[in-house]
Amino acid sequence: MRALLIASACLAAVAVPVVAQQTMSVPGAKDPKRVTAGTYTVDSGHTQVEWRVNHLGFNDYFGLFGSATGTLVLDPAKPAASTVSIEIPINKVATSHDGLTKHLLGADFFDAEKFPTATFKSTAVTVHGEHATVAGNLTIKGVTKPATLDVQFSGAGKMPEQMGGKEGLGFHATTKIKRSDFGISYGIPMVPDEVPLQISVAFMKQ
């Protein structure tokens, strides 16, 4: 019995590092060959839209939108035929100051009670290697305007089985908008009209 216990302990000591290595293996990589055709949905918990505005000429102020939903239809053999549609719940805006968050949700800015969702729907995709330009229609506060995203592929791969085993994709995108185009003119020019957006989006294959 003593020998059996010692053997079991030795096996456990060997198995733990092996399991740890498997757990720590990174499933995604920046390898376009890993991308497979299909329909993907937004991974809401790992997708963020960051906005930045200058605060009265002193410093930049950052905020985030989260909990986005949406769909990507993609065929790596025909990337220009891809389509993407994203919905962003306005009431998920996050800042470091509760008072500002409340103000942003009010009528001076997003009027979230009346206009609870912002959307982007693609109309054309132009591919340049691992980069792409995605043109589409952006709707904020009930106003729809054309917008163009500069998109970079950031990773693809299959999730571990213990995390669902689905195929995933990631992209980083940037754009700039004029908030006055969407009826959000409060504070201009003390707070700039032009707002840069940084978008980090993850998709999971269905």
Image (cartoon, rainbow, N blue to C red):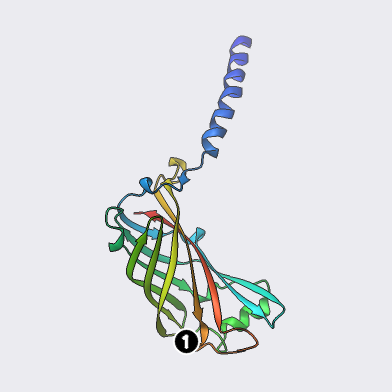
Task: Determine the residue positioned at 35% across, 61% down.
Answer: 127
Please name whichever residue, 181 or 16, is drawn nearer the observer in this view of the structure.
181
Task: Specify the quadrant of the image occupied by residue 131.
Answer: bottom left
Residue found farthest to the front:
128
Task: Determine the residue positioned at 53% across, 71% down.
Answer: 197
Task: Determine the residue positioned at 67% across, 71% down.
Answer: 96
Q: Left or right of 27: which side holds 74?
A: left
Please name whichever residue, 31 or 168, is drawn nearer the observer in this view of the structure.
31
**How many dots with numbers?**
1
Q: Left or right of 77: which side holds 9?
A: right
Tell me the quarter of the image containing the C terminus.
bottom left
Tell me the quarter of the image containing the N terminus.
top right
Question: Is residue 205 at all visible to an observer of this figure?
Answer: yes
Q: Left or right of 93: which side holds 80?
A: left
| Rendered location of residue 153, percent (x, y) | 43, 56
Instruction: Please say if 112 is above or below 70.
Output: below
Q: Left or right of 116: which side holds 51?
A: right
Instruction: Please say if 199 is above or below 142.
Output: above
Question: Is residue 112 at all visible to an observer of this figure?
Answer: no
Q: Amino acid at mark 1?
A: Asp
| Rendered location of residue 139, percent (x, y) | 42, 80
| Rendered location of residue 88, percent (x, y) | 46, 72
| Rendered location of residue 4, percent (x, y) | 58, 12
Please give the residue where the numbered disc 1 appears in the rendered image: 181
Q: Residues within 10 Å of mark 1 (few under 14, many from 20)?
A: some
Question: The residue tagged with tag 1: helix, strand or loop?
Answer: helix
